[in-house]
Amino acid sequence: MVNNGEGGRINALKLVLEQLIHFLRTDEAKKVEFDNTAILCTAIRACQAKIEYLYKSLRGLEKTKDNKVRWIIERLKWPFRKEECQQIVEELHRFARTFEFSLVISNCSLLAKTSSSMNKVLKQLEDNNKDLRNMMNTCEKFAMPVPPDTMIKLEQIMETLRLVTDLSQSNMKIQNSIFVGVQNIQERFEASEINEMLQWLSPIDPGKRHHEVRVNRTKVTGDWFLRTDDFQEWKDCSRREDESRMDSVFGCYEIPGAGKSTTCSLAIDHLSETFLSQEDTCVT
């Protein structure tokens, strides 16, 4: 029991997802590197969550069929309000347009960037949007026909911009919640209690461990990490004096033995040297 708006959007989304699967299996697309924090992967997970929400909401109607009276009553009550239904239709359309946008290798590479690079991706999308609009204005000025696919590309970029903006805001809310949570913990516990809790979490002395790793670290080990765009952007964000510092959380993960401790030790030394002259900054 799906209305025409949602049914049409779901069918369109289904076709685009099939195209995306086929595209990502091509030799050209396989050269693009993704990880779990890539913007496209984040968008796919958000789309999956929305579809699962739809399924569970509509599945509830099927479960009432055993009781015919209740089933009739439930069928008269559409599980979504009008505003919510319209929002779902728009979100499904936005996902479809974003996945369509990623079917071009250059766009796919753009959305393969990690969530920490969302500001750069947003700027690139805005620049693309501006270029397309300038081209359309030029065509209109000289009474020239606008290329047929231009409006489609423009809509794809606009919807992708909205989706990436939503994902960025969602990430910021999560990071702000973590920041507020840490602040609350710091306010609730005295320094001795925090040290006791940290000792319970891990008996390893961080300072001693850092010294051991530093001694065994070769000169150029991990320099590549310090030069990555993600790390540089995060470090520059940490230097700012505005509210953007609140969401400057940079996390890394890998399998055991991959060199996380060595890389972390290198980053600590690098940051300690970088922020040495800033009295309001502490590197631990």
Image (cartoon, grey):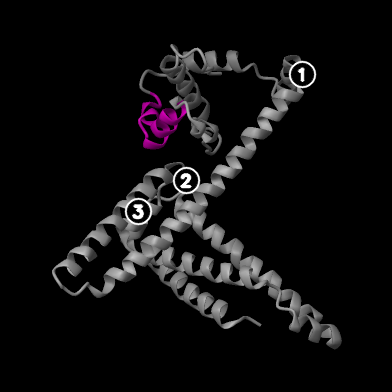
Task: Residue 174 in the image: state x and y as whole percent.
Answer: 60, 43
- Describe the element under mark 1 as helix, strand or loop: helix
Distance between mark 1 and mark 2 Cα atoms: 35 Å
Residue 25 makes an appearance in the image: no
Q: Quadrant of the C terminus?
A: top right
Q: Nearer the viewer, mark 3 or mark 2?
A: 3
Q: Position of residue 271 (x, y in %)?
A: 45, 20
User: On the rendered structure, is 44 left or right of 190?
Assistant: left
Comparing labels 3 and 1, the label whose residue is closer to the camera: 3
- The amino acid beneath tag 3 is Leu
Task: Report helix, strand or loop for mark 2.
Answer: helix
Q: Position of residue 6 (x, y in %)?
A: 56, 76
* Quadrant of the rendering where the N terminus is positioned: bottom right
Q: Residue at x 41, y 56 (%)?
A: 161
Earlier residue among tags 1 and 2: 2
Question: What number is the disc on residue 193?
Answer: 1
Give the mark, 3 or 1, whose residue is nearer the N terminus: 3
Q: Amino acid at mark 2?
A: Ser
Q: Earlier in the sequence, mark 3 or mark 2?
A: 2
- Residue type for callout 1: Glu
Q: Is residue 31 left or right of residue 186?
A: left
Kindly identify which residue carries mark 2. Answer: 115
Residue tagged 3: 125
In space, the residues marked 3 and 1 are separated at their CA atoms by 48 Å
Extent of the magenta region:
221-238
Q: Nearer the viewer, residue 55 or 204?
A: 55
Q: Secondary structure at mark 3?
A: helix
Residue shown at 75%/83% (left/top)?
76
In this rendering, the answer to whether 119 lies above or below 281 is: below
- Number of the label disc, if any, that sits on residue 79: none
Q: Is the residue 250 above or below the residue 134 in the image?
A: above
